[in-house]
Every structure is written in C-alpha cells, then in structure tokens.
Image (spheres, rainbow, N blue to C red):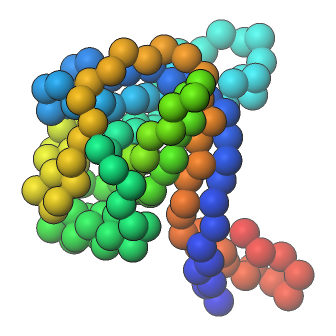
C-alpha cells in the first residue's frame, strides 16, 4: 500500500545566487552546501541539489503543484517542484524549489515552463549567505510491513 500525505520541511542552508543557465535578470538561488555539517571533515565535490526560483509574489501551493504536474507531463524533464518560503535576514521570499534535475542545463527550460504558466520572477539579486527554507511537499509513504513504513 502507498500513502500520500502533505507536509513541510524546515531547514537552514547556505544559499547563493545562480548567474548562468537561467532567464537573464531573474532571481534563482542554489544551495551551495547541501546539509551543512552532514558531510563532516571529508572534502567532497558536492554540487547543488536544489535550485530556488524566486517569485515576485506568493502563489498558492495548489497552483505550483498543478503547474509542476503540467510541466512533467508535457516535457521529458524529470524533477520535483515544490512551493517554498525562504527567509534571509529580515527578507522573506517565495519560490519554487526545483530538485532532482539530472541535467542542470534543463533549469532554463523548467524556468521558462513555469513562466509560460503564469509564474513571475523576482529581479536578480546577489546572495551568498545562510537562509531558513520551508518547503511544502507531498510525501509518498510505502508500507513494507505491518509495523514499517518507508
């Protein structure tokens, strides 16, 4: 049996502005060090696993999830798109977290799809700091036994 439930995650991550491979003069962030502290003292070539398309205004969760479904059905691009709120110092931004892109050159295509479906982006802003991120998403939970869910 597979269950779907809606929930949110809140985490603190290092964020920086993406400069290339996006619509010019739009505000896109990447997590420059996913899960800080998790990787320990062993140096690795960790790349961003999430991008945040920062919108000019807060859009409904339903609208973002609906547009994400449309994009995945009408393109060959595999990714997750989730509504997000990002707090950096005293500023709050709303956006879409894009995760799971196997080909980072597709970020521009994803950004264009969202724009073509009514999402407007904040103008480019230079950021390289820590932010608190709240992500709303659908969790798929599979029951593997009477007492174990994964």
| Residue 136 appears left or right of 52 | right
Q: In this view, does 25 lie above or below 79?
A: above
Residue depicted at x 62% and y 36%: 132
Q: In this view, does 26 lie above or below 77?
A: above
Q: Which of 76 and 111 is in front in this view?
A: 111
Whether residue 34 is visible, yes or no, is no
Q: How many marks?
A: 0
Q: Nearer the viewer, residue 120 or 128?
A: 120
Q: Nearer the viewer, residue 116 or 120?
A: 120
**Quadrant location, the N terminus:** bottom right
Q: Position of residue 129 (x, y in %)?
A: 55, 17
Instruction: Pick out the residue farthest to the right.
Output: 147
Quarter of image, res 83 = bottom left
Whether residue 51 is visible, yes or no, is yes
**Quadrant location, the C terminus:** bottom right
Q: Where is residue 102 in the image (x, y as percent from the top left)?
A: 34, 42
| Residue 114 appears left or right of 51 | left
């Amino acid at each position: 049996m597979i269950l779907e439930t809606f929930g949110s995650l809140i985490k603190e991550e290092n964020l920086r502005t993406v400069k290339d491979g996006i619509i010019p003069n739009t505000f896109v962030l990447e997590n420059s060090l996913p899960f800080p502290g998790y990787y320990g003292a062993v140096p690795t070539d960790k790349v961003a696993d999430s991008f945040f398309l920062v919108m000019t205004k807060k859009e409904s969760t339903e609208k973002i999830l609906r547009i994400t479904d449309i994009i995945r059905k009408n393109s060959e691009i595999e990714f997750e798109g989730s509504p997000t709120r990002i707090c950096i110092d005293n500023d709050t931004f709303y956006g879409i977290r894009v995760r799971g892109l196997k080909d980072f050159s597709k970020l521009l295509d994803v950004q264009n799809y969202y724009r073509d479906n009514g999402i407007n982006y904040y103008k480019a802003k230079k950021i390289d700091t820590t932010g608190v991120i709240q992500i709303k998403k659908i969790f798929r939970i599979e029951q593997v036994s009477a007492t174990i869910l994964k």
